[in-house]
Image: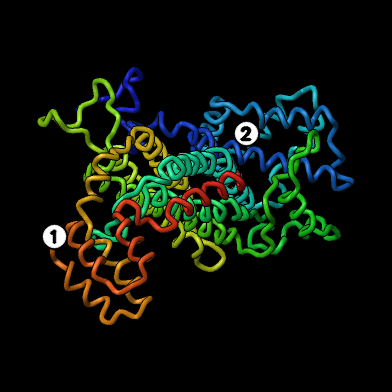
C-alpha cells in the first residue's frame, strides 16, 4: 500500500482534478472559495460586527480607538495560512468551526497587549450571533469576490473574443445547416454574433443578482439581541452592518444586500438565481462548443498547431478539437453541481437543518469547473483559423438553397404554384447553377427582378447577416 510522505506531490493524490491536474488553471478561485477563504471571510464578518457594536453607544462597550480599528483591519488584511491552521487546531478541540474562529479572535485580542480595550471587550465577539449569521454573510462575500473578480471578467473576455470573431467574419458567407441539411446561407460572423447577444444578456443577469446577508439571530427574530439590549433597533443596526460598504477606518460594513426575513439560515434564493444564471451562460457555451466542434469536423475551421502536441496516440495526422471538448465536458460538470445547489439550497426543514452546510462547501466546485471551461474555450478560440476555401466550396455545391428566394419572388408576382414548382425542381436532387438559371430565365416576372435572381449565388444570398453581425458588435462595444 502506497503511503504519502511530506515530499509526495499532493496534486497527484487530489481526489478532485480541480485541486490536482487543473489546479493551476483555477488558482484564482483558490484563495476565495477554499476553506481558507471561508475562514478569512468569517474573521472579516466577526470583526465587522464587533466594531459596529462598539459604535452603538453602549455603556458596556465604548467606541474602539483608531489604533484598535487599525489592528482589527490588519487581522483581516493580513490573514494568513498560519492563521487558518491555528483556527483548524482550535476546531479539533471544539469540533465547531465558527466557534473556533471566535476563540482565535479572542486569543488575538489577548496577544495585543498594547490594546487592552480589545481584551476587555472580547466578550462582545460573536455577541448575540448564531453561527449562520457569520456563515451566510461569509458565503455571500466569497461569492461576491469570485463572481466580480474572477468569473465575470473571464466571461467578459470570452464575450470580447466572440465579438472580435463576429466582426472579423461578418462578411464571410457560410452555408447553414438546419436539421443537418443544407439551408439558407448566413455568415460566419453572424453565427458568432448570435452567441454574443445571448451571452451578453445572461451576463447582465449574473451581475444584477443581489447578494444577500442576514444577521438576525438563532431563528431570525433578534431574540437574544433584545434580551440583552431591549431598546436598540436591532433590525436597523443589522441592516447597516450588512449593507454599508467598508469605508476607511470605519471598517464595519459588508457591502451586501440585507435579508430582513429568515429562519436560522438565509433562504438561499439569491444563490439559486445566481447559479441558474451561470447555468444559462454555461449552456449557451456548451451550444457554442458543439457547433464549433461540428464546423471543425466539416473543415470550416482549422486549428493552429502547437509544437510537440499529439492528437492521437496511434493516428499521427490528427488535430483534435480538444479544447472545445474539454470546455463542453467541464461546463456540464459545472451545471450539474450548480443545478443541485440551486434546487437543494432553498429547501430547509423547519427553522433549519444542516443539509445546506455541506452543500455550500461545494460552491467553489461549481465555479471551478465553470472557470476551467472558460479557460479551455478561450484557448480553443485562440487556435481557430477560418478555412475560406472549404466554406466557399461547400456553398458552391449547394445551389439548391436558392430555391427559397426564387419561389419567394415568384409568389410576390403571383406566379401560380411557385413553391411546388421549386420543390419539383430541387428536392432530393443535385442542383446545378445552370438548372436554376434556365428556370429563372423562363419566369414571367419583371426583367429587373429576373436579373437580380440570375446574378444571385449561394454566397451572395446572405440577407442582413453581415449587417446584423456588425451591429451587435457595435452594441457590445458601447455597453462595455
Q: Residue furthest left?
A: 314
Q: Residue furthest front?
A: 447
Q: Residue furthest top?
A: 7
| Figure check: 424 above or below 436 | below
Q: Are the residues tagged 2 and 1 within 8 Å (C-beta)?
A: no
Question: Quadrant where the C terminus lies?
Answer: top right
SS state under label 2: helix
The residue located at (34%, 77%) in the rendering is: 411
Distance of mark 2 from mark 1, alpha carbons? 79 Å
Please state which of residues 477 and 154 is positioned toward the viewer in this rendering: 477
Please state which of residues 409 and 38 is positioned toward the viewer in this rendering: 409
The residue located at (58%, 58%) in the rendering is: 265
Residue 242 in sight here = yes
The residue located at (34%, 43%) in the rendering is: 327
Q: Picture coordinates of residue 268 (x, y %)?
A: 55, 59
Residue 359 in sight here = no
Q: Which mark is residue 104?
A: 2
Q: Which mark is residue 430?
A: 1
Please state which of residues 455 and 4 is positioned toward the viewer in this rendering: 455
Asked if residue 252 lies left or right of residue 433, the reply is right
Amino acid at each position: 500500500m502506497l503511503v504519502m510522505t511530506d515530499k509526495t506531490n499532493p496534486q497527484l493524490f487530489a481526489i478532485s482534478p480541480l485541486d490536482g491536474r487543473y489546479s493551476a488553471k483555477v488558482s484564482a478561485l483558490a484563495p476565495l472559495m477554499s476553506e481558507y477563504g471561508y475562514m478569512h471571510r468569517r474573521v472579516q464578518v466577526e470583526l465587522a460586527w464587533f466594531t459596529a457594536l462598539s459604535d452603538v453607544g453602549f455603556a458596556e462597550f465604548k467606541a474602539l480607538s483608531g489604533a484598535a480599528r487599525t489592528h482589527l483591519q490588519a487581522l483581516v488584511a493580513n490573514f494568513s495560512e498560519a492563521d487558518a491552521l491555528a483556527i483548524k487546531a482550535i476546531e479539533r478541540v471544539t469540533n465547531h468551526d465558527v466557534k473556533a474562529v471566535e476563540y482565535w479572535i479572542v486569543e488575538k485580542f489577548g496577544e495585543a497587549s498594547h490594546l487592552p480595550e480589545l481584551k476587555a471587550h472580547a466578550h462582545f465577539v460573536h455577541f448575540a450571533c448564531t453561527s449562520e449569521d457569520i456563515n451566510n454573510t461569509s458565503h455571500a462575500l466569497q461569492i461576491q469576490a469570485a463572481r466580480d473578480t474572477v468569473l465575470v471578467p473571464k466571461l467578459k473576455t470570452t464575450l470580447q473574443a466572440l465579438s472580435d470573431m463576429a466582426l472579423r467574419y461578418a462578411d464571410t458567407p457560410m452555408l447553414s445547416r438546419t436539421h443537418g441539411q443544407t439551408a439558407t446561407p448566413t455568415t460566419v460572423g453572424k453565427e458568432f454574433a448570435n452567441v454574443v447577444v445571448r451571452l451578453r444578456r445572461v451576463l447582465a443577469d449574473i451581475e444584477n443578482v443581489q447578494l444577500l446577508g442576514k444577521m438576525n439571530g438563532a431563528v431570525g427574530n433578534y431574540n437574544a439581541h433584545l434580551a440583552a439590549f431591549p431598546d436598540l433597533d436591532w433590525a436597523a443596526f443589522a441592516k447597516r452592518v450588512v449593507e454599508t460598504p467598508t469605508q476607511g477606518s470605519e471598517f464595519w460594513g459588508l457591502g451586501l444586500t440585507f435579508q430582513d426575513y429568515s429562519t436560522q439560515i438565509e433562504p438561499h434564493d439569491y444563490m439559486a438565481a445566481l447559479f441558474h444564471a451561470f447555468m444559462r451562460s454555461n449552456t449557451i457555451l456548451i451550444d457554442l462548443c458543439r457547433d464549433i466542434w461540428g464546423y471543425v469536423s466539416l473543415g470550416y475551421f482549422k486549428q493552429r498547431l502547437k509544437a510537440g502536441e499529439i492528437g492521437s496516440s496511434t493516428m499521427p495526422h490528427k488535430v483534435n478539437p480538444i479544447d472545445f471538448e474539454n470546455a463542453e465536458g467541464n461546463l456540464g460538470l459545472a451545471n450539474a453541481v450548480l443545478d443541485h445547489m440551486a434546487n437543494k439550497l432553498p429547501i430547509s426543514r423547519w427553522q433549519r437543518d444542516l443539509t445546506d452546510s455541506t452543500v455550500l462547501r461545494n460552491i467553489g466546485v461549481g465555479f471551478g469547473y465553470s472557470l476551467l471551461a472558460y479557460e479551455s474555450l478561450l484557448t480553443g478560440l485562440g487556435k481557430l483559423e477560418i478555412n475560406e476555401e472549404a466554406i466557399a466550396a461547400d456553398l458552391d455545391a449547394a445551389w439548391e438553397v436558392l430555391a427559397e428566394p426564387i419561389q419567394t419572388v415568384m409568389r410576390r408576382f403571383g406566379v401560380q404554384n411557385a413553391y411546388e414548382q421549386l420543390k419539383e425542381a430541387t428536392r432530393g436532387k443535385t442542383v446545378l447553377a445552370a438548372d436554376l438559371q434556365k428556370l429563372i430565365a423562363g419566369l414571367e416576372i419583371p426583367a429587373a427582378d429576373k436579373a437580380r435572381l440570375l446574378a444571385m449565388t449561394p454566397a451572395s444570398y446572405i440577407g442582413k447577416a453581415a449587417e446584423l453581425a456588425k451591429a451587435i458588435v457595435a452594441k457590445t462595444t458601447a455597453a462595455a
